[in-house]
Structure formats: C-alpha cells, structure tokens
Image (cartoon, helix red, strand yellow):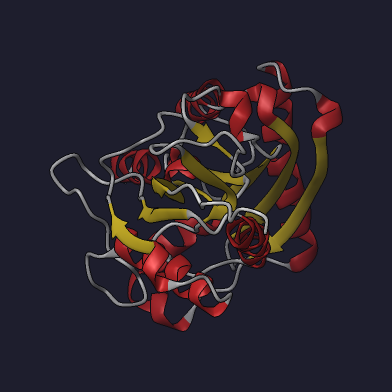
Amino acid sequence: MTRLFSILFLLFSVVSFAQEEEEVHSIFFEFDKYNLKEEQANAVVAFVSKIDTSRIESIQIFGYCDDRGKDAYNYTLSTNRANTVKDKLIEKGIKSKIIITLEGKGRIMLDEDMQTNVPEARSKNRRVDVVVNFKPIVIEDLKIPGVYSSIKKDRIVGDRIYLDHVLFERGSSQLSYKGKKELDRIALELHKYKNIHFEIQGHVCCTPTFQKEAIDRDTKKRELSVNRAKRVYNYFLMKRISKTRMTFKGYGNTQSLKKGSTLDRRVELLITKNEVVPVEPKK
C-alpha cells in the first residue's frame, strides 16, 4: 500500500497547469498528516527550482482534506498543511511578502462519478495547491529577433506580431476576455496599416515530439493549433478586416519560443506582404 501511494504521489505531484499568467502545483499528503515526507519536500524543491522566481508577482496557498472527519478538525488540518508548504517555500528562497493568501479550505466532498475509486479520489483531495501568479510578459523584453507586440512603422515582411494576451488554457481554443481586448487593439492597427497582409499562426505546447498537433478538448479532434488560429481569423472578420489580407494556419508544437509552456499556447501574426500604397499626386 505504501508503495502504491508513493507511485500515486510521484504521478500526481508533478501535475501542474498553466493558464494565462499563473501556474498551479499540488503537493499530496498521507491520511491525517500535515508533515512533509522526504519525497514530498523534494517535490516542492523541484517545483521552486523550475520556475522563474523573478517573474513571480504573488503566491496563494490552499490546503485541503478528504471527506472524512469533522469540519473543525479538517479546517485545522488543512491549514496546517498549507503552513507546512509555506514554511518549505520560504526555506527554499521564496520571499514571505509575496505569499498573499494562506488558507485551509477543509474537506473536499467526493464527486458521485469518483465513487468507483474512492481511495484514489481521497488521496488526490489530501493536498495543498500552490498557485503562482506571474507578472505579465512584455515580448520585447525577451529580445526575440523580429518579434514585436505591435505593428512597427518600419515593419518588414517576416516580422511577427506576438499577441500578448491571446494565451489559451491548456487544450482550449476559446478566447478569453483579455484575449478579445488584445485583438481589438491589433484590429485598430490593422485598419491603420491597410497595406499589410498576414498569416495568423496558431501554436500549442506540451505535446510529445512525435505528436506535432494537440487535441482540442471541445471538438475532441487533433486540430488545436488550427482552431486557435481560426478563432482569431473569425474574430478579425467580425472586426471588418478583409479576408483577402489574411490566412490562418496551425503549426502545432513545431515553433516553440523556448520561454515556457504558457507562451507556446499562443497565436502570432506573420507579415507576408507589406505593399507600398501609391500616393496620388496633388492636382
């Protein structure tokens, strides 16, 4: 049983997910315990070592218990678990002032669809979630040649416009509110520079090298990067950008920025034509 728990722990402790500007990491505990065993402490250390601490804006820590026991006891236990993880993070160099939330949430009730494997469900609920909120990235700060966040006056064919806030949740091609606001901004620039033609390029992260494309969780098909690009294409059509100026294409995981998974779940605009608009002579 101990070996099974260790396997489950190693399997689930590395599960984290990123959204627009956050990452969540879970640390799992044994029943009725809040102390960290060696492998759990190592998981926290590994988690801290892989993140760019200079980008951290704030950290939130939430402790949980399984569904057994009384509420008051579980709130205390979940809070103790959260405090244990906080102490380990501070020990490993995380500044206490950026930990803005520390909360024991008590017990998590079992979902009806998890009743077939109650022990596993409970083992996942005995945990602490560490939510790391990152500072927004300004693409120019990464100094990637030919990649900008706005259309430059001296633009050339081959320049790429990185859409700062058009970052997708894992497995999703849905546009967020921030993403739509970003596209509104770029649409205004495209109306200003009507001579630009461009390809909308969709990208994904975190797929094996032999699997170039990822599955869109809405369609259940392996077409995620294409759907992300098409979503932006349709949004620009709605903003009255002419379809003769733009195409869209999915590139899967073949064009990573090498700057983390969040930035690879993106859409970019590649300038393919930069026609010079003739100026009519004055009469």
Compared across the picture, whether 191 is left or right of 58 comes to left
Is 130 located above or below residue 139 in the figure? Answer: below
Is 236 above or below relative to 83?
A: below
How many discs mark residues in the rendered view?
0
Question: Where is residue 116 shown, x and y percent of the image?
Answer: 33, 76
Residue in the foreground of this view, choosing between 157 and 120: 157
The image quarter containing residue 140 is top right
Left or right position of 83 against 228: right
> Where residue 221 sits: x, y (%)?
23, 71
Residue drawn at 76 percent across, 47 percent down? 79
> For residue 67, which quarter of the picture?
bottom right
**Residue 128 locus on image (x, y percent):** 62, 46
- Looking at this view, name the residue that lies furthest to the right: 97
**Left or right relative to 87: residue 3:** left
Can residue 88 be seen? no
Residue 11: give x, y in percent of width and height. 34, 43
In the displayed image of the protein, which residue is found farthest to the bottom?
112
